[in-house]
Image (cartoon, rainbow, N blue to C red):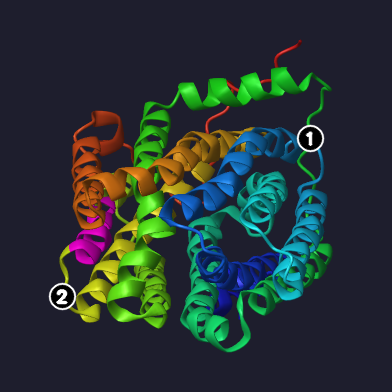
Amino acid sequence: MHRTLGPLAHPDFRWLTLGATISRAGTALTVVALAFAVLDLGGSASDLGLVVGAYALTEVITTLLGGVLGDRVPRQVMLEGASVASALGHAVIAASLLGGWASLPLLAVLGMANGVFSALGGPSSQAMTPLTVPAAELSRAIAVRRISANLATIGGFSLAGLLVAWWGAGAVIALDAASYLLAALCFWRLRVPQVLPEQHTSMLSDLTVGLREVRRHAWLWLLIGQALLYHLFFGGAQGVLGPIVVGDDFGREAWGWALAALMGGFVVGGLLTLRWRPRHALFVGTVCLSLTACFPLAMAWSPTVAGVLVGAFLHGLGLEIFSVWWDTSIQQQIPPETLARVYSLDMVGSFVMRPVGLALTGPVAELVGLRTWLVVIGLVIGVSSLLTCLVPDVRNLVRREEGAEPERGAAEPITA
């Protein structure tokens, strides 16, 4: 039975995966609903970028705190608390839209609050997987969890455009609020060992330990930098330009379909990694990352919605293959007691420029042309991924055999 079900044979992993999956389904609805809510309130591309960027900015700022707390406080508690707080935050957004008292500044402020809640639980969620399965099943557990969440996101994206058209953005975001409460109940069912520090040091010292751990792995800090570049450019393509360009050319439903095709690529990529175990997995994943250029280029050049869907699918395929091997490399190479902090630094380093990209995308695209800027985005993220593959530390990192222990000795606590 265990061989057949793999990581799903373990109850804690099932509850963790179910909670994350439910939350992702609701979040997918909000991504689409919030974009059209801003546009329906008379917002421009620049306004949409500022509203989405407000969420991203506070998420980045708070993630470091979430990482430190995730290594000091039981991670299950962090997940439960963040989910309940997110439910309340999204409920207020839904109430403002349904009650007719929403405004662009209000949506921006509420988005900032929800960014804080999301950031507090994010590192703990990522670092929780190794606590729910045996080490021998870690890479499969990572892939299964991502596949499940991506399938839920596909459903959310596929339905979002239709639900917004039928019910309105407020009702759709209310569904997301309910999904966070259901996720909190799932996390409450977890019974996992606690990974807590033996010594009580200052939060600054704890963060310094995580930073030192990142610095000693060249492949880690280099690819965090690559992710920074990706989110700086592509964040605006997805969060700002996509709904406008695709929505205007092919209808609002088409943008939901494009996001669903993107998630379809994620699912197929995840399924491939369940069986495919390349020796130099991180290098293979980084090569596949160059496929992310396909989506913005398709939005810029394709005369049909089919071309946009194909570009979105290839983007998701390449990004998911990279993401599975990226997570596997981190969770195999980094000691468990610093994992949440390393993930928080990964998230901050990756997303720190996303708010800037979201805020600047509208003005820059309006200046040079929306499609011209989409071409620039595609070239930057595609070429930079291929250049990263040339670095020896990325090219030569060897995937550990399942169950091997991560290196230790460089992440002992620093006394303040």
Q: Residue furthest bottom?
A: 166
Residue 319 part of the magenta-drawn span: no
Please give the range of residues in magenta: 288-300
Location of residue 6 by image quarter: bottom right
In depth, the one of 145 and 291 nearer the eye is 291
Which residue carries the number 2 mark? 303
For residue 224, above or below residue 209:
below
Instruction: Give the image location of residue 187, x and y in percent.
Output: 77, 63
In depth, the one of 317 and 49 nearer the eye is 49
Instruction: Give the image location of residue 342, x and y in percent.
Output: 57, 34
In depth, the one of 5 and 244 nearer the eye is 244
For residue 63, above or below residue 18:
above
What amino acid is labelled 2 in the image? Pro
Which of labels 2 and 1 is toward the front? 2
For residue 372, above or below residue 313:
above
Q: Residues within 10 Å of mark 2 (few under 14, many from 20)?
A: few
- The reply, left or right, for residue 247 in relation to residue 173 is left
Which residue carries the number 1 mark? 72
Residue at 19% over, 37% down: 387
**Sequence-earlier tag: 2 or 1:** 1
Q: CA distance from mark 2 to mark 1?
A: 52 Å
Instruction: Give the image location of residue 404, x and y in percent.
Output: 51, 44
What amino acid is labelled 1 in the image? Arg
Residue at 54% over, 77% down: 156
Q: Residue furthest front?
A: 42
Where is the C terminus found, in terms of image quarters? top right
- The reply, left or right, for residue 153 in relation to residue 17 is left
